[in-house]
DNA sequence: GCCGGCCATCGGAAAAATCGATCAAAATAT
DNA sequence: ATATTTTGATCGATTTTTCCGATGGCCGGC
């Protein structure tokens, strides 16, 4: 079972094809003539083909030799391309990144972020997956995602989380709702009200309940409300009130409807937006840089 | 000055990408786990890029790793192609061959030969150069031609010649010419006649003069007769007689004209058709096989 | 907090690459 | 003819690299 040729041997062959002279080719390759001679001999043996016609005046290439050289040159070019491409691959904001984002963040952050990145870092290709936190974390651990953009805190093993900024939860209600006239809005004011939240699995639901100390009995889950848009529509239809993240309230989401939002006069009613990645990912530093970038440009 | 990755390292990386496990990848590559580990580490160092995310459960590929693997797989395929292509390259009747042929052979041998080869050996590509023997031999030595098909004897250094078959020289004349009535045609009969031959440089001229013991004063060079066709036209116009190779006489060359040909009743009035190649060419055996092929099929 | 699987590391042995010098062949110069 | 020069192949010794098996360290799971 014979071995296979090496890159080096192909390099030597190409040099020899260029120089048509073992000595000069060896010089060009910075090796001794004997080393190059041996390499070419072994290559011919491995390929089982006469590549070179030796001559006391130099060498000539056989047709087979010419063919092999042509292929080898293409191969070496591809090889160099691979090497140089991989060099610029570990720089931040380059290459591919598979990013998972939860549905209550994606529509409010991604449009601006992607547009900006496309402009400032056109070589940076983000592949987006939008899903619930739970599923995203699973995909993260399976290696199908590299990085998550989600709401913290979110419990997960073997990950590193980086908080980026706070996203206060605002109360959303119909104009004329009794909460409009309150001097100071507290979480306790929504006790007993019909609070509409997204279905189970959306971490926004958990963060809202946690922030306002709501129990399961306090809230009602709107029929098939899988998006904030739907919830807003229902609030506009006077079915209840809800808690909206500030980034959603600031967006065009509620522009078309008539509902109002109001911040609580109380701290801690918020979720945090952050990144999460596998603890052992060798790309931590790049993720941190991306985090800073989002901090600066998306808040 | 760092070195470059090796084919082996890329192979190991691809195996690792397939197996997602150092141990199994090492097994697939028939090396120890430590060898594969070291190779991957060195590869990552050489490419200055984190390709692998290590894990106590196996490994995951980074996006950069995936990209490198994709490129590496293409590269390895090309590499294997090169190797397997070169294996079938040294077989006879395959690959490229640059063949030089003289003008007094080419039109009579090549059409049939090329047609036959194209049918029986479609992988065999002949690149034809038609020129005078002198120029062909020069090109042969420069390495721009691999093999010559010409008339022998032809003196040249550092070559091997292989005679294939005799090509008798026939006398060509107008119908009714006095030679028609001769019982036995000898070379001496053309002494004193106006003998038309190709211009200097065509070896057919030399072979004809040598065969018939003609001196320069015996012959006349037709104005601008650089092809046998022209010479035949002139014979048909009663300007003189000429000596035609049998292969030319048998061809359609003289069909359209009215001239007759007659063999000499005397041995040795002939040229020999043969191959010639550089003495040091490693392809001698292939050339000999091609010679036998021509012998069998072109005569 | 121990266990088990995983990859990195280590040290020695085996293999390979390389060098400088020499050899043989052959074309060229004398 | 003969000597010289130039060429690539070969040889022997040394250096370098590769490889293996064993060990170690890490980390997640139990």
Image (spheres, coloured by chain):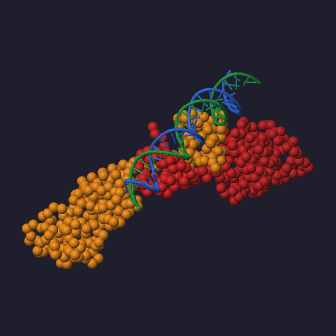
Chain colours: A orange, B red, C blue, D green
Q: Please state which of residues B277 and B230 is positioned toward the viewer in this rendering.
A: B277
Name the image quarter holding residue A207. Answer: bottom left
Q: Please state which of residues A193 and A58 is positioned toward the viewer in this rendering.
A: A193
Q: Is residue C9 left or right of residue B109?
A: left
How many numbered tags mark residues here? 0
Q: Please state which of residues B142 and B88 is positioned toward the viewer in this rendering.
A: B88
Identify the residue at image location x=18%, y=62%: A268
| Residue A151 in view of the camera | yes
Q: Where is residue A158 in the image (x, y as percent from the top left)?
A: 35, 57
Identify the residue at image location x=64%, y=34%: A57
Identify the residue at image location x=35%, y=66%: A135
| Residue B224 in view of the camera | no
Q: Position of residue B271 (x, y in %)?
A: 79, 45
Q: In this view, does A273 lie above or below A17?
A: below
Q: Identify the image quadrant of the C terminus of chain A.
A: bottom left
Q: In this view, does A48 lie to the left or right of A119?
A: right
Q: In this view, does B195 lie to the left or right of B95?
A: right
Identify the residue at image location x=69%, y=52%: B93
Name the image quarter holding residue A24. Answer: top right
Q: Please state which of residues B149 and B32 is positioned toward the viewer in this rendering.
A: B32
Q: Position of residue A7 (x, y in %)?
A: 54, 45
Q: Is residue A201 left or right of residue B139?
A: left
Q: Position of residue A283 (x, y in %)?
A: 36, 52
């Amino acid at each position: 079972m014979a071995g296979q040729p090496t890159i080096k041997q192909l390099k030597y062959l190409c040099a020899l094809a260029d120089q048509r002279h073992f000595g000069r080719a060896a010089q060009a390759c910075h090796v001794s003539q004997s080393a190059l001679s041996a390499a070419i001999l072994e290559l011919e043996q491995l390929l089982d083909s006469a590549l070179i016609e030796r001559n006391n005046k130099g060498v000539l290439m056989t047709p087979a030799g010419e063919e092999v050289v042509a292929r080898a040159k293409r191969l070496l070019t591809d090889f160099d391309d691979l090497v140089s491409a991989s060099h610029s691959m570990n720089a931040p904001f380059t290459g591919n990144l598979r990013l998972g984002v939860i549905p209550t963040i994606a529509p409010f952050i991604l449009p601006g972020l992607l547009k900006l990145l496309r402009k400032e870092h056109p070589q940076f290709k983000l592949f987006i997956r939008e899903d619930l936190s739970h599923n995203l974390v699973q995909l993260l651990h399976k290696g199908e995602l590299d990085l998550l953009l989600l709401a913290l805190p979110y419990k997960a093993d073997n990950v590193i989380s980086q908080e980026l900024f706070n996203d206060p939860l605002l109360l959303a209600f119909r104009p004329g709702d009794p909460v409009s006239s309150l001097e100071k809005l507290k979480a306790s004011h929504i006790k007993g009200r019909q609070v509409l939240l997204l279905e189970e699995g959306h971490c926004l639901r958990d963060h809202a309940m946690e922030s306002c100390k709501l129990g399961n009995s306090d809230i009602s889950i709107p029929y098939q409300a899988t998006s904030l848009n739907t919830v807003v529509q229902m609030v506009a239809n006077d079915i209840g009130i809800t808690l909206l993240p500030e980034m959603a309230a600031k967006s065009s989401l509620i522009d078309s409807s008539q509902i109002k939002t109001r911040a609580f006069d109380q701290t801690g009613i918020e979720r945090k937006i952050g990144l999460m990645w596998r603890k052992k990912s060798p790309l931590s530093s790049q993720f941190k840089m991306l985090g800073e970038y989002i901090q600066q440009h998306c808040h």
